Amino acid sequence: MTMTRKTFLQSGAATVAMSAAPSLGLGATIRGTPKDTLLTDAIVLTMDAERRAYHSGYVWLRDDRIFRVGPMNELGQLPDGITHRALNRRLIMPGLVNCHTHLSNGILRGIYDEMPLEVWFAKGMWPVLDSLDARAAEAAADLSLLELMNTGVTTTASGEIPAAHPDMIDAVLTSVARSGIRAVVSRIAMDSADDSSGAQFIPPAYRDQPQFAADEVRRLQKRFNSARIRVVPEALGVLRCTPEMIKNLHAVAVDSDTLFTMHAASSQDERDESRRRFGHGSITELESMGVLGPKTLLAHAIWLDDREIASLAERQTGVSHNPVSNAYYASGVSRLPQLLAAGVRVGIGVDGASTNNSQNVWESMKMAMLFQKQHLEQASFGSAELALELMTRGGAAALHMQDQIGSLEAGKLADLIVIDIDRPALAPTQTIISNLVYSNDPWAVRDVYVDGQLRVSDGRHTALSSDAIIRNARSALAGILARSGLDDYLSKRSRWQWR
Ligand SMILES: [Zn+2]
């Protein structure tokens, strides 16, 4: 028999299916339970360690887990009494893992485009945080989550700043719980009184006490932690927090066996100011504090030297690469090739709607590749396969959840998405992997399962009303624009004659 790509993939899969379930035998009928869901006749991208993919395959869900995955010719007779969906060549892949956003910024998209720095400081930053109360934060989180989930995200990390409204993060977490998404939500604290850099300065009203910040994380963990939700501490940045704050919050993470998150090496200004204050970059400073480790997740991590990259790899620290956000604020180009070559755990994040402005992870995957090609002047950099891997198993590794999510494998959590590939932007389908990333159509995602539960069905969220969320978002933003004074700025920004 000639070994084509197709037969190669199928023979490889057969070997593994037999070794994983030797007692079943090929083609034997396996008993189901009434709660099982069997998705068949689909293109399946497993994203497992061998990157097995099936031209015609099935995924079998039992409770909150994946029970079996394989090619159709190994399924045998369909078991009776279970929920069976024939997908007619739709594509199944692991749910997407978004490593960084700010859910409460969902309503702020469009405001910060090309904003002059003086407006950003006077109106865009602190006055907006003053206005982002619990009601606005919940409306914004609903909007962010609707976009993330309907376009295929099953796990998201998100950071929230509740300094002005302590209960705004409760509102975000209430929205997260309602949506059914899997989430790591960090409570962001900052407390530095150092005023030597305008960009890093924290006004007194926004400075948390380290003890209070730690207590708040524990309170939120008690109230919201669940099988799907983890509340974790975040010290915003090495220049925006005192060492006491950073160490205190890291201790809370260690105590509660959760991630410790930070924004780090996210601008040239931060790198330069860090060198001025400490004599080295921010990653080196965090390393000396002992807070980089296998359960730390850093957002951005752009301005790194070779030694810092090696240190992140050695310590298995996770990194969220946020290409669109980095470009939006011209914060620099990530050293993605070096991070990957060193073996750093890299995932992709959209970042908040105030720095992106969408929550479209497909666009971030595409730009993660394109920005590097352009920067390196090397069209051969990366691939659509790499982009999909970073958005699934890469993100799972960055969040230190690689044993639970990120690939379709028996025993892992049943987080997966179903994509309709018969759409204009995704045709012709011979090059479907490239089309998914480089010709992305986020709304081609039709079904989204989290923990084996159908959260998006044929493009509609099963618990969230799109109309109500969009209405609430409009009204919440109106309040913020009025209270922060940004409505005045926005009305003068356009040179078009609006009537
Ligand atoms: Zn961020």
Image (cartoon, grey):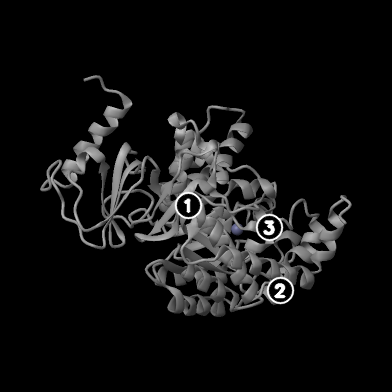
Q: Residues within 10 Å of mark 2 (few under 14, many from 20)?
A: some
For this view, does 231 lie left or right of residue 192?
Answer: left
Q: Quadrant of residue 223?
A: bottom left
Q: Earlier in the sequence, mark 2 or mark 1?
A: 2
Residue sitting at 46 percent across and 53 percent down? 458
Marks 1 and 3: CB-CB under 8 Å? Answer: no
Residue drawn at (26%, 43%), measured in percent from left and top?
A: 70
Residue on which the image places disc 2? 130
Residue at point 58% right, 61% down?
Answer: 144
Please give the residue where the numbered disc 3 appears in the rendered image: 109
How many residues crowd mark 3 within 10 Å: few (<14), some (14–19), many (20+)? some
The one of 497 and 248 positioned closer to us in this rendering: 497
Q: Position of residue 249 (x, y in %)?
A: 51, 70
Q: Point out the residue furthest to the top here.
A: 2
Q: Secondary structure at mark 1?
A: loop
Element class at badge 2: helix
Q: Quadrant of ligand 1?
A: bottom right
- What residue type is disc 2 on? Asp
Which of marks 3 and 2 precedes in the sequence? 3
Image depth: mark 1 or mark 3 in front: 1
Callout in the foreground (2, 3): 3
Give the camera-side residue of 440 and 458.
Answer: 458
Query: Is residue 351 visible to the viewer in this orientation of the structure?
Result: yes
In this orientation, which residue lies closer to the viewer: 15 or 284?
15
Apparent side of residue 97 relative to residue 267 in the rendered image (left or right)? left
Q: Quadrant of the N terminus?
A: top left
Q: Quick check: can you spot residue 337?
A: no
Name the mark on residue 152.
1
Is the Cβ of the residue at disc 2 closer than 8 Å to that at disc 1? no
Q: CA distance from mark 1 to mark 3?
A: 20 Å
Which percent across, then down, holds residue 276?
Answer: 68, 54
Give how far apart the Cα atoms at labels 2 and 3 are: 17 Å
